[in-house]
């Protein structure tokens, strides 16, 4: 990838170099005063200051050199030494042609880590997925698409919560409800029934009940802890019952993730790290890294210069039970052994930041991380209109499946209101309503910086105007139908040309896409992609509003506009695909 910014910066760097200054003063950026020029260099200010020269005089000399390249329509000075640049149409067309010839090569930035593991989703056994898992799934999926697009070999892992105290709570609750089940017979070694004694609904009903009971009754809490330790120690009946919890939950999750359009390469869970724990602990002990503390085994992780005191990572409780951090550490060991990643991303609620600091430090200190960089990609909460984390009207957790259905319903209503998709057959209409609902939810999430909290407001998300998923989908569909119509009429895309301001603006918007993709990758910030998709849709909308395309009589002009439209569709579809937003054929 060479972006228009890189190309222009090269010209400016040449100019600074010729004036005896370092090349990196020649950084060209999109102008924040587009009325003065489309691009801007501000390096003359810093360069002159450092050399004790007059910035205006230096800017003038650099500007002269830039004019002499013949690549700019205008080069002008502003303020104390800013240089504003407006490239010639030829300069822009050369870059557009490169984009047209090989979109992937032109859009994907170099310098992506080769092997990346992305840990996201993170649903828990026996608990319905809620909006927090929705964010992890949407952002994580976007990042896996993005890193793949940039050329990384990505392994995504759902990392199910299937091993902690909640398992013991459930086992205890079921033992109370159905004590006669074979799983609870002392000394039973199986075989146990192949049929699960509980459905997903049972699990969702039992878990909160068990959690509440344990909170009020220390004896029940203790029983749940014992059951957890026994499960982890390999008690056959508990293991068999637990297997049912896991497979029952997985069946439900498969459906939910399919409706979101999210795929994982690995469906591993915390439990998969369990076999590695004894060896890992023994190693940490023998190296003196893991130490006893108040009956528990911990790994101290404080570092010099810490502003706040971070507690050690708890490895084993006094009853021998492993904890969330233990499985996370062992999972790193597992991932490093199996995948040898350069980078592991954890897309998890920002409220778990301290947990990841502890785990990452432990992994580095012990060498478990190998050469993998470990990063917590945190995100904020989804709030209700009251500004507190989103709940159902009754105050319970909002299930993901219900949320998706609500969005689909809202989409049906809006499509009807807008007169969209009304002539299509019911199956296609339903498909479109589903796609619009998903677009609404995903875009509303991804358009915010991930660390920002936002208010869940379906009525606003499912609008066809403004900065929304449905607006972008509709923009793409509109270009599609324009191109389809052109083909039916035998109008062919022709050589690229740029004359009118709206054409230039669209072209420049397209050419800033690789920069947005690079920013999104480097900052792990999907909102850069969302902003870019919106900027392109807006630029196209202006272009479409100001110019005739199909009805343009001049064949060359029509051909050029169709070529620009086709390129717009390519780029917009790429961006929407990176955001995980499907684009229907028509609406
Ligand atoms: N199951 C966890 C939760 O619901 C999220 C798991 C995140 N991933 C990890 N490796 N800890 O909070």
Image (tube, rainbow, N blue to C red):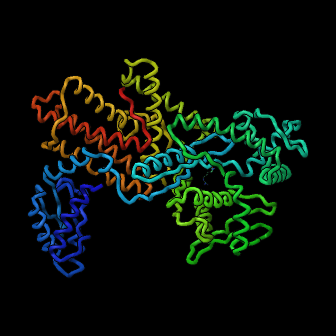
- Give whichever of 226, 353 is nearer the camera: 226
Asked if one can make out residue 251 in the rendered structure from this viewpoint, the answer is: yes
Q: Position of residue 565 (x, y in %)?
A: 24, 37
Q: Is residue 223 above or below residue 15?
A: above
Q: Residue at x 18, y 42 (%)?
A: 503
Q: Position of residue 58 (x, y in %)?
A: 15, 73
Number of numbered callouts drawn: 0
Q: Quadrant of residue 358?
A: bottom right
219 sits left or right of 151 in the view = right
Q: Position of residue 226 (x, y in %)?
A: 83, 53
Q: Residue at x 8, y 63 (%)?
A: 68
Asked if one can make out residue 546 in the rendered structure from this viewpoint, the answer is: no
- Give whichever of 580, 391 is nearer the camera: 580
Residue with the most extreme bottom position = 52
553 sits left or right of 374 in the view = left
Q: Position of residue 453 (x, y in %)?
A: 50, 50
352 sits left or right of 524 in the view = right
In the picture, which quadrant includes the C terminus? top left
């Amino acid at each position: 990838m060479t972006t228009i910014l890189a190309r222009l910066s090269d010209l400016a760097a040449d100019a600074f170099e010729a004036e005896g200054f370092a090349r990196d003063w020649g950084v060209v950026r999109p102008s924040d005063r587009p009325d003065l020029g489309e691009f801007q260099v501000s390096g003359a200010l810093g360069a002159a200051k450092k050399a004790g020269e007059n910035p205006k005089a230096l800017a003038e000399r650099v500007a002269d050199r830039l004019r002499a390249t013949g690549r700019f329509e205008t080069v002008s000075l502003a303020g104390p030494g800013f240089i504003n640049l407006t490239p010639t149409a030829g300069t822009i067309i050369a870059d557009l042609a490169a984009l047209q010839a090989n979109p992937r090569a032109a859009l994907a930035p170099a310098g992506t880590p080769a092997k990346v593991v992305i840990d996201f989703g993170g649903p828990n056994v026996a608990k319905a997925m809620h909006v927090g898992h929705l964010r992890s799934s949407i952002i994580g999926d976007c990042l896996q698409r993005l890193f793949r697009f940039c050329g990384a070999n990505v392994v995504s892992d759902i990392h199910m919560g299937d091993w902690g105290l909640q398992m013991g709570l459930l086992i205890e609750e079921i033992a109370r409800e159905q004590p006669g089940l074979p799983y609870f017979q002392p000394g039973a070694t199986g075989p146990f029934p192949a049929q699960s004694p509980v459905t997903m609904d049972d699990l969702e009903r039992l878990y909160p009940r068990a959690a509440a009971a344990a909170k009020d009754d220390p004896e029940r809490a203790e029983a749940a802890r014992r059951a957890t330790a026994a499960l982890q120690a390999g008690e056959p009946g508990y293991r068999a019952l637990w297997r049912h919890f896991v497979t029952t939950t997985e069946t439900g999750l498969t459906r939910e993730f399919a409706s979101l359009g999210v795929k994982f390469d690995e469906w591993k869970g915390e439990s998969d790290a369990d076999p590695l724990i004894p060896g890992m602990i023994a190693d940490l002990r023998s190296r003196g890294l893991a130490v006893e503390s108040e009956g528990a085994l911990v790994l101290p992780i404080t570092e010099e210069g810490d502003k706040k005191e971070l507690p050690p990572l708890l490895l084993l409780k006094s009853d021998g039970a492993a904890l969330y951090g233990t499985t996370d550490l062992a999972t790193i060991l597992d991932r490093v052994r199996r995948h040898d990643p350069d980078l592991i991303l954890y897309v998890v609620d920002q409220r778990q930041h301290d947990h990841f600091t502890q785990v990452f430090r432990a992994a580095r200190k012990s060498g478990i991380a190998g050469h993998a960089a470990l990063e917590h990609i945190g995100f904020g909460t989804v709030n209700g209109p009251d500004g507190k984390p989103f709940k159902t009207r009754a105050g319970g957790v909002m299930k993901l499946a219900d949320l998706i259905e609500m969005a689909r319903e809202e989409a049906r209503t809006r499509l009807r209101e807008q007169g969209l998709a009304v002539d299509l057959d019911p199956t296609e209409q339903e498909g479109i309503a589903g796609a619009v609902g998903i677009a609404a939810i995903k875009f509303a999430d991804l358009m915010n910086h991930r660390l920002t909290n936002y208010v869940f407001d379906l009525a606003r998300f499912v609008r066809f105007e403004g900065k929304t998923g449905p607006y972008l989908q509709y923009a793409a569909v509109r270009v599609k139908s324009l191109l389809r119509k052109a083909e039916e009429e035998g109008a062919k895309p022709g050589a690229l040309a740029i004359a009118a301001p709206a054409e230039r603006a669209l072209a420049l918007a397209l050419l800033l896409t690789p920069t947005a993709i690079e920013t999104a990758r480097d900052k792990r910030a999907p909102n850069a992609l969302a902003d870019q998709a919106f900027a392109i849709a807006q630029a196209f909308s202006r272009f479409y509003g100001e110019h005739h395309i199909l009805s343009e009589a001049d064949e060359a002009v029509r051909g050029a506009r169709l070529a620009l439209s086709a390129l717009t569709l390519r780029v917009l579809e790429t961006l929407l695909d990176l955001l995980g937003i499907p684009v229907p054929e028509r609406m």
